[in-house]
Image (cartoon, helix red, strand yellow):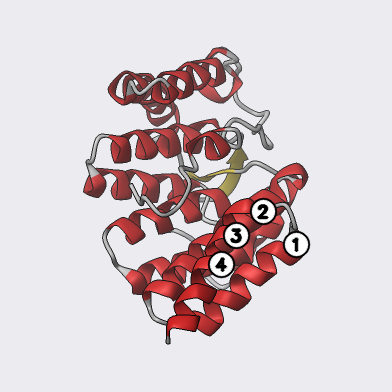
């Protein structure tokens, strides 16, 4: 994990269990998306990871993932997960546009949007894998979360953090930029926090690329949006120190 940036774990995990829109056409008894026990299982996973027991947390995430895959894995519908009504609407509109253009995913007849539970299980698992130093597995797991929630600013920022660990600055920059772009679709009470997360990630990458003026502006944006963003303030001071040395 990056030592220059304050650990983001507690902030991130507060975001992941919000519920979006569910498909009401399936029988509740068979549908894991209607099982109230699964979000609770993810809460348990979160607590385990927070207590530095990532493997135990992964095992709980995998139970949730297995139930969703068994129910939806062979679905004729394109499945999305969302945390807000805006994100839900965006996925449905995109699916409709792709259908009109004949570009919809092969073998899928329509699209449905579930709660965030399935994608959140991948997100938590991805974070836990990073804690174990299994970076390649973390990256592939976060990409599975993004297959379900491609416009999730939170998941995009976490993937960007993996690219940071890999020092893949090109992909990190692109991913944080996309996270910044889609922060407007985050739940209302999380928009500002997730926008700040994306911008701080982008600022970090810009520093690594030697683009100090751009990084300075990005951190200034963070502070304009949230004057109490202590992480952005510390990074801005760091960047200005680097510029002074030049």
Q: Residue at x 49, y 49 (%)?
A: 155
Query: Is residue 124 at all visible to an observer of this figure?
Result: yes
Lateral position of residue 218 relative to residue 187, left or right: left
Vertical side of 52 occupied by 198: above or below: below
Q: Secondary structure at mark 4?
A: helix
Whole-number angstrom distance, CA of label 1 to CA of label 2: 9 Å
Q: In front: 29, or 138?
A: 138
* Dot placed on the residue nearer the N-terminal end, 3 or 4: 3
Q: Position of residue 222 (x, y in %)?
A: 67, 63
Vertical side of 172 occupied by 154: above or below: above
| Residue farthest front in this picture | 245
The residue labelled by disc 4 is 237
Vertical side of 117 occupied by 181: above or below: below
Lateral position of residue 214 relative to residue 58, left or right: right
Whole-number angstrom distance, CA of label 3 to CA of label 4: 9 Å
Residues marked 1 and 2 touching at CB (< 8 Å): yes
Whole-number angstrom distance, CA of label 2 to CA of label 3: 5 Å
Q: Secondary structure at mark 2?
A: loop
Q: Secondary structure at mark 3?
A: helix
Residue 115 location, quadrant: top right
- On residue 178, the disc is none
| Residue farthest bottom in this picture | 246
- On residue 229, the disc is 2
Which tag is nearer the camera, tag 3 or tag 1?
Answer: 3
Lateral position of residue 224 relative to residue 135, left or right: right
């Amino acid at each position: 994990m990056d030592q220059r940036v304050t650990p983001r774990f507690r902030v991130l995990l507060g975001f992941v269990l919000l519920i979006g829109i569910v498909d009401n056409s399936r029988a509740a008894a068979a549908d894991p998306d209607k099982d109230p026990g699964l979000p609770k299982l993810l809460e348990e996973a979160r607590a385990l990871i927070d207590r530095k027991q990532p493997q135990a947390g992964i095992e709980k995430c995998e139970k949730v993932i297995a139930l969703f895959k068994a129910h939806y894995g062979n679905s004729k519908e394109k499945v999305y997960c969302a945390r807000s009504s805006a994100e839900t609407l965006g996925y449905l509109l995109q699916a409709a546009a792709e259908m009109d253009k004949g570009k919809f995913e092969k073998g899928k007849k329509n699209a449905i949007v579930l709660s965030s539970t399935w994608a959140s299980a991948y997100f938590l698992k991805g974070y836990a894998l990073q804690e174990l130093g299994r970076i390649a597995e973390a990256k592939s797991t976060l990409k599975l979360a993004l297959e379900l929630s491609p416009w999730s600013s939170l998941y995009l920022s976490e993937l960007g953090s993996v690219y940071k660990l890999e020092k893949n600055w090109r992909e990190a920059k692109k991913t944080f930029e996309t996270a910044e772009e889609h922060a407007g679709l985050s739940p209302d009470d999380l928009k500002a926090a997730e926008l700040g997360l994306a911008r701080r990630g982008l600022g970090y990458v810009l520093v690594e690329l030697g683009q100090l003026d751009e990084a300075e502006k990005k951190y200034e944006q963070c502070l304009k949006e949230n004057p109490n963003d202590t992480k952005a303030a510390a990074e801005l001071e760091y960047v200005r120190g680097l510029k002074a040395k030049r």
